[in-house]
Image (cartoon, rainbow, N blue to C red):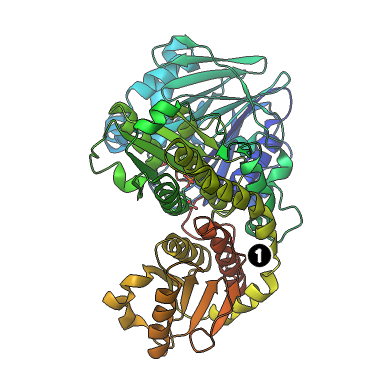
Amino acid sequence: MCGIVAYVGPKDAAPILLEGLQRLEYRGYDSAGLAVVNRGLKTRKVKGRVADLASAVPARFKGGIGIGHTRWATHGVPSDLNAHPHLDAAERIAVVHNGIIENADELRAKLTADGVDFASETDSEVLAHLISRTVKDTDSLEEAVRTALKLVVGTYGIAVVDAERSGEVVVARNGSPIVLGIGEKEMFAASDVAALVRYTRQVVHLEDGELAVLRADGFHTFTMDARETAKVPLTVDWDAGHYDTGGYEHYLLKEISEQPDTVARTLRGRIDDRFHIAHLGGLNLTPHETRAFRRVKIIGCGSAYYSGQIGAQLIEELARIPADAEPASEFRYRNPVVEHDTLYVAISQSGETYDTLAAVQELKRKGGRVLGIVNTVGSAIARECDGGVYLHAGPEVSVASTKAFTSTAVSFALLALHFGRVHDLSPADGRRICEALRLLPGQIAQILELEPRIAELARKYADHPSMMFVGRVRGYPVAREGAQKLKEISYVHAEAYPASELKHGPLALIGPDMPTVAIVPDDELLDKNLTTLGEIRARGGRVLMVGHREADPRLADDCIVVPKSEVELDPILLTLPLQLFAYHAAVALGRDVDKPRNLAKSVTVE
Ligand code: G6P
């Protein structure tokens, strides 16, 4: 997704902007650009990588105020011209924009009728021309931005500079994140804290409908009707080191390998062995309120949604509260019935996914009670929810989610334990879950030791055009996440099905060219799963079984055996080998593992 960086201070802006843009590369983009104020505007824009932009920026690019952008094409193809910043005709105003201006065509037609020439095909360029119109009259960039934004329908995070007011940057937010970074006699802004942590840990998140004026000596924030707002800076505990590959070949492998530690962090201080309960300080729910909920509805997108399916099963099994998960992107468009006795849970690693945020906002408008399970502290979804659980998994850089997935599932286990013990889960069962939770980091480390064998299997299966993933009940979300991982990073078509449904249709696809990854936990459904394997083998299908015991060679060609947990928690561990399988399949096929084509880490547009 598009990325924004802005700087005002005593140093040269260009190197800071380039470094910040590099930190945002993981979000996905197709072109990059920057503008620096120094007796006029100096701009460079390129289709391609930030490294290409860096080579296009000459050493004489001096000036202590500037804005930079990585673009993910929406209106207009990726090209030098469509890259941001966009300028007005007089080259006085430069704007970078994330989001979508919905009435851009209408505004463009009006401006064109008034004689304005457009240099690009983007919706964003209208902003530069609109701001340019008022800035001449008001001599206040802040006022000109506000006037322009009042004409705009859509979502935006923007940063604006004015060549004739070289002391300030104006930023504004509506539906697309903007974070301010407070330095020593310098100010930063970005669409993601990743771009700031090298310089400062003190940040301020703008709310929708807020605008900020940044000068080297500080900042002021305002509402759209010019009322000043008070902001309390937040200290982020992620540092620049979190954004390095740490010696691994890819962020994805680094993040997979971090999971013993990240799961331990999610659990830290949250298990109470005296009463076999979970302490989740941020829920903001009394035991009385917790008992009053009759249903739990979980929403999220992509891998977050699949981890929500694991969460729904955990809540049903441990707390006996009916629970289900739905993609937030579907939920928000179907005018959902919001019930006062349903607890809603929104999941998001980034805390910025627009579909999830919009679903939460819709729930809040209808009086729903929403908890967030979120990785990014202070993010929009976290702020919007009534309470929640932070993952503490550290920043996740690779587009495909791994450590956030496991930490979300572990957070659900804690939540289910908490709800269960408020309801009818016995202390003995509580103890059983607490003890199993404590073992997870060590068991994950054991699974990671299987990497050489899993890599070998990945290479063996990677050249098939298509793979089937099957699982029953607890194994089904695991199969879905396994198929998701494989398709998003290796581009091998992968379909996930409930094992029980195979004979109702997809069995027709099974044959030597369509191998199956079967999730076969050692639980009460083991025999049924083994029968399914027999059905696949009888049709000439190859089977890679992922389970808790060596497979009968008549039922599976290959097998990955993972440590056993309690049945309710097994899905968490069963996911791990599938992450490594997808990773090594993608490497074997020579894919861009951390930045798969067409995908973005954080989808902040509709
Ligand atoms: C994008 C990413 C996925 C991610 C989903 C939800 O589609 O490519 O990997 O699972 O967004 O992201 P979130 O930050 O809300 O968890």
Q: Depth check: 102 or 491 in front? A: 491
Residue shown at 47%/62% (left/top)?
Answer: 478
Residue shown at 45%/72% (left/top)?
Answer: 526
Query: Secondary structure beneath disc 1?
Result: helix
Question: The C terminus lies in which quarter of the figure?
Answer: top left
Q: Depth check: 261 or 287 in front? A: 287
Report the side of 175 relative to 215 (left or right).
Answer: left
Type of amino acid under label 1: Ile
| Residue 2 visible here | no
Q: How many marks overall?
A: 1
Residue shown at 58%/17% (left/top)?
Answer: 232
* Residue with the most extreme right position: 247
Q: Depth check: 301 or 47 in front? A: 301
Which residue carries the number 1 mark?
Answer: 447
Query: Horizontal and vertical percent for residue 334?
Result: 24, 43
Q: Is residue 228 above or below residue 280?
A: above
| Residue 6 visible here | yes
* Residue with the most extreme top position: 227
Query: Horizontal and vertical percent for residue 363?
Result: 32, 33
Report the side of 196 relative to 213 (left or right).
Answer: right
Location of residue 255 by image quarter = bottom right
Residue shown at 39%/87% (left/top)?
Answer: 511
Q: Is residue 226 above or below residue 454?
A: above
Query: Horizontal and vertical percent for residue 594?
Result: 59, 58
